[in-house]
Each structure stands twice: as structure tokens, then as C-alpha cells.
Amino acid sequence: MYRFALLFICLLFTTNHLLVAQTDEDAFFIKEIYNTALTKGKAYEWLYHLSENIGGRLAGSPQAAAAVEYTKQLMDTLGMDEVSLQECMVPHWERGEKEVVRIVNSYQIGSLELKALSLGNSIGTGDNGLTAEVIEVQTLDELDSLGFDKVNGKIVFFNRPLDPTKLNTFSAYGGAADQRVFGASRAAKYGGVAALVRSLTTRNDNVPHTGVMIYEEGIPQVPAIAISTNDANLLSRLLKKEPVNVYMSNTSRNLSKKKSYNVIGEIKGSEFPNEIILVGGHLDSWDVGGGAHDDGAGCVHALDVIQVLKRLNYKPKRTIRCVMFMNEENGQAGAIAYRDESDAKGEFHMAAIESDRGGFTPRGFTCDADKEIFEEKFRKITDWLPLLQPYGLDLKKGGSGADIARLKPQKGLLFGFEPDTQRYFDYHHTDIDRIDAVNKRELQLGVAAIASLIYLLDQYGI
């Protein structure tokens, strides 16, 4: 009995010693990841080209095609084992000429042009534009309560702001986006002739925000245009004092679908090549601005993760796959094509990490998975927190990302990279989402954070 107890103590001591040694080795390697990302990272350089030289990369546009070619060439230079293009058919919407939204013949202010952007998928007003009285609502339900008699022939103005009490601005955005996505069809259902939508941002400024809207089948299509928050506030104040007429003109149009591509590169795993760890972002962006935060940052995060691990001569056990998804903004055709082909091949994504919340200071990762396996696997990865928390990173339950969410039935863990959210919607879907809105150090810290999680996933699996 004594010998057994002594043997148990010796084994326990040896095991603990090995665990401590392994933890020290992990900590040193993660430190090297950070050092390399911060001193020899390429993300900012690559993002500059995407944002400023290529520009807004709306699916179906020449700029989107240029971005596909650029990122494929980058992958070719990174020494991956395989680089390929995956075909997908994407919507092709064109903004057309500059939009005009003008308050006309107001008793209080006369005529005044408002800062405006057509919403993605909106039809145009026709060559002559349209003029109508404006009616303001806060919610889709409020519009339903007004009915045909009060809405017919009017421009419906949706003016619900993002909830400023939400600490997570993505929650605030989610609580207000329905008016942008579905407002035009709901207005047309009751005879409305157009929709004006308050821009979805947490601050008051003169910058209009575009974004996707969806027409409901069987309901007439009417134009939908966003106006800046300052102009939305002005219009709302004016409506409390007098009836207001607005002139709207845009030439937006939907064209036939076009062929485009996801860009995919991978490093084959040496021990478990059939266990895939995906890292990616979406290559498309809206046509205004440069798509720097949304989602050029996510794309260069993923590319620079590969560059940093290669520079450190890291040989992964599992396959690390870098994916530039096409058409997240306007239909997710790339995500659907990727999921369909992956399922057809019987692939298993042990983990997938999406970066689509900007290039701001990293705060950690949100995590999601099929409910059958989530609790057990999430509990395991929280053992890594002592290695991540020194860098300000946390792991918590939450959503992952639009492009990887369809992989959930494969029963791996899905991660959403989570930077600080407070400034993201200052730039989201705007003309000012350009490289000068991105801090180089914050961007490279994001690379290091994602690479560190990939290293732990690769070393220990889940």
C-alpha cells in the first residue's frame, strides 16, 4: 500500500511537471507570435492595397474581381500547399448616379438637400424622381398599425435609432436593422411610394450608411434610401412642426448574376490532415469607401496569420485553411457554395474562426457550436484562458459569423473574433471606411490573437 501511494505521488508529480513544462512552451510560442505579428506583420500593408488601390468591392463588380486576383496572388506567395478559386454566382447590383434626397418648400427651412445613400438592392425612382409627403414611424409594427389609409402615397421614414444603452453595439445594430432590411416592402404593402431609413450607427453625424435591403415576393418594389443621423434628427424635428414633402431620385438597378469566387489556401496537417481549422473573412464590401474595417481587416487578419506562422517555421498537425468568402454583404453566395462543397466532400471543420467585426483592439472570441457538443468542447477550451488572458483575450459563448455559421452541422467549434465594438458602426457601410480609420497596431494585435488561438487548437484539438 505504501509503495502504491509513493508510486502515485511520483506519477502525479511527473504529470504536473510535464503539464507545467508544456504550458511554459505554449506561453513562449504565443509570445513569439505576438512579437512577430507586431514587428513583421503584413496585414496593414495588404489592407492599404485592398482599401485604397482596389476600393469598394461589391460582389459582381470589377473591384471584387480585382480583389479575388490580388488575394490569390498573395496566397501563392505565402508557400501554402494548395491555393484555389471556388466558383459562386453572385448578385450584381449597381448604385448608379449620385442619389438626391431633398426637403422641398418647407415653411421653416425652405429646401434642403440631405446626405443620402441608396440601400443595396434598391430599385431606382425613374428619371424624373418622385416627390411625396413623409410619414415617420419607429417600428415595422407601428407602420402596420397605421394601415393603408394613412400610408398610401407617402414616403415612409423609419427613424428608430440604435439603442445607446447596449454596451455591445452589435446587439444595438441587430435591434434596429429590420427597418433597413424590410422597411421598403412593408411600406409598399400599405401603398407607400418609397422608404427613407435612418442610418444604423451609434453616433450623430453627417455620414449616410448603406447596407442590404430585401424585397418581399409579391409586393411592389419601391426605392429605399438611407439618410445620415443628423439629417434624420432634423427631418423628425421638422415633422413635429409641419407636413414635410421630400424629393427623391436614384438610378440604382439589379442586373443579372455574375460568376465570382471564394479564394482558398491551405497548409496540410502533418498528423490530422482531415481535421480542418478555418480562418477567414469576406472579401466583398459595399461600393462606397474602401471596406477597410468591413471586411478588409478580416481578410488580412486571416492572410497574415498564415504569414506569421510560416515565418515562425510552424508545422501544423491539422490542416489550416484560409478562406476569403465572396458576397457576404448581399446574399452570402460564397458561404453557401463553400458549405455545399465541404459537405459533399464529407469534410470536418474541427474549428472555424471568422473575423468580421473590424480591425480594432482585440477583446477575445465568441464561440458557438451544435448544442449536442457545445458545452463539453467549450469547457475544454476555457482551460486555455491563462495563456490568452495576459493579452486581454477572453472566450465566451456567442455567435460566430455569417460565413461560417452554416458549418455548424459538422459539429466543430465556431469562433467569432471579437475586437472592441464601440467605434465599428461609426464606419460600417460608409464612404469613410478607409485605411485611415484603421490603427496599424490594433490590426496586427488582431492577427496575433487569432494566430494564438489557432496554435492552441492545432496543438491540442478539441
Image (cartoon, helix red, strand yellow):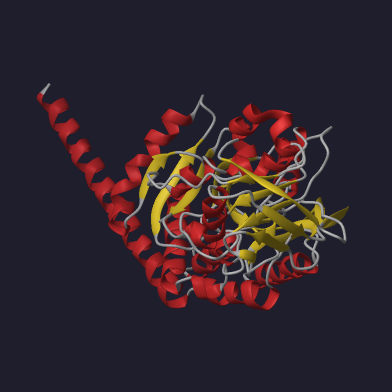
**Numbered circles on residues, count:** 0
Q: Nearer the viewer, residue 356 or 387?
A: 356
Q: In the image, what residue occupies the spot 35% across and 40% down? A: 382
Q: Residue 118: x, y in percent?
A: 71, 57
At 77% from the left edge and 44% from the top edge, which residue is drawn? 193
Residue 45 or residue 171, whichever sits in front: 171
**306 or 143: nearer the eye?**
143
The image position of residue 420, as x and y in percent, is: 40, 56
Q: Quadrant of the N terminus?
A: top left
Left or right: where does residue 287 sit relative to residue 16? right
Judge whether residue 119 can be spotted in this image: yes
Q: Work out which residue is located at the far left of the displayed protein and give it.
A: 2
Closer-to-camera residue (108/11): 108
Left or right of residue 461: residue 261: right
Query: Could you say which quadrant of the image residue 396 lies in?
Result: top left
Q: Could you tell me which residue is drawn at 42 percent across and 35 percent down?
A: 378
Q: Could you say where residue 308 lies in the image, as x and y percent from the top left?
A: 49, 68
Residue for point 21% across, 36% down: 12
